[in-house]
C-alpha cells in the first residue's frame, strides 16, 4: 500500500504489487505500463488511446472516434449510433435467427426492415408495405 498526501516525486520507477489508492486525481505524464489488467470503475477520459490486445467497455462514449483504418474482429453492442455512414466490404450480420429490426430513418423508427423469424417485411410505422419469405412475396397497400 502506498499513500501520498501532498506532492511527491518518485524516481524512475513505481512498482505496486498489491493495492494503491490515490486521492482525487492521478496525472501520468509520459508512459504507464500495467501488467495483466487495468480496471476503471467510473470514468476514464483520454485524448489518445492505443489498445493492442483486447478492450472491453461497459459504456463507450465520446465526441469522436476516428481512424484511418480500424480492424474490429468482434463487436457487440445493445445499441450503437453512427453519425454518417459505415461501409462493410465483407458483409454485415444483423440480428438473430428469431428476428430483428433495422430502422432506416434513425431513431424515429418509422421506416424499417423487419425479420420475424419466418419472413422479411418493409414497413412504415406498423403498416406492412412489402413482405417476402423463402417461397413468395407480397405487395401491400396501394402501389403506382
Image (cartoon, rainbow, N blue to C red):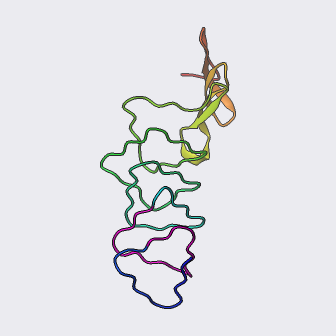
Residue 142 shown left or right of residue 88 in the figure: right
* Magenta range: 15-34
The x, y position of residue 84, in whole percent, is 42, 48
Q: Quadrant of the N terminus?
A: bottom right
Q: Work out which residue is located at the far right of the displayed protein and give it.
A: 126
Q: Using the image as rendered, state which of residue 2 and residue 85 is in the foreground.
A: 2
Question: Is residue 144 toward the left or the right of residue 50 in the image?
Answer: right
Q: Position of residue 13 (x, y in %)?
A: 38, 74
Q: Residue at x 35, y 81 (%)?
A: 11
Identify the residue at image location x=59%, y=11%: 134
> What residue sits 52% from the left and 67% below the top?
17
Q: Is residue 74 above or below residue 55?
A: above
**Above or below 2: residue 86:** above
32 falls in the magenta region: yes
Task: Give the residue at x 41% y 44%.
Answer: 85
Q: Main secondary structure of the magenta part?
A: loop
Amino acid at each position: 500500500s502506498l499513500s501520498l498526501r501532498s506532492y511527491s516525486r518518485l524516481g524512475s520507477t513505481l512498482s505496486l504489487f498489491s493495492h494503491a489508492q490515490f486521492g482525487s486525481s492521478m496525472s501520468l505524464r509520459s508512459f504507464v505500463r500495467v501488467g495483466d489488467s487495468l480496471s476503471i470503475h467510473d470514468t476514464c477520459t483520454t485524448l489518445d488511446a492505443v489498445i493492442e490486445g483486447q478492450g472491453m467497455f461497459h459504456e463507450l462514449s465520446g465526441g469522436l472516434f476516428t481512424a484511418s483504418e480500424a480492424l474490429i474482429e468482434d463487436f457487440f453492442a445493445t445499441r450503437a449510433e453512427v453519425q454518417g455512414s459505415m461501409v462493410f466490404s465483407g458483409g454485415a450480420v444483423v440480428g438473430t435467427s428469431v428476428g430483428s429490426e433495422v430502422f432506416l430513418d434513425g431513431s424515429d423508427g418509422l421506416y424499417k426492415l423487419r425479420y420475424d423469424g419466418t419472413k422479411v417485411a418493409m414497413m412504415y410505422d406498423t403498416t406492412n408495405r412489402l413482405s417476402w419469405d423463402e417461397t413468395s412475396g407480397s405487395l401491400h397497400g396501394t402501389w403506382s
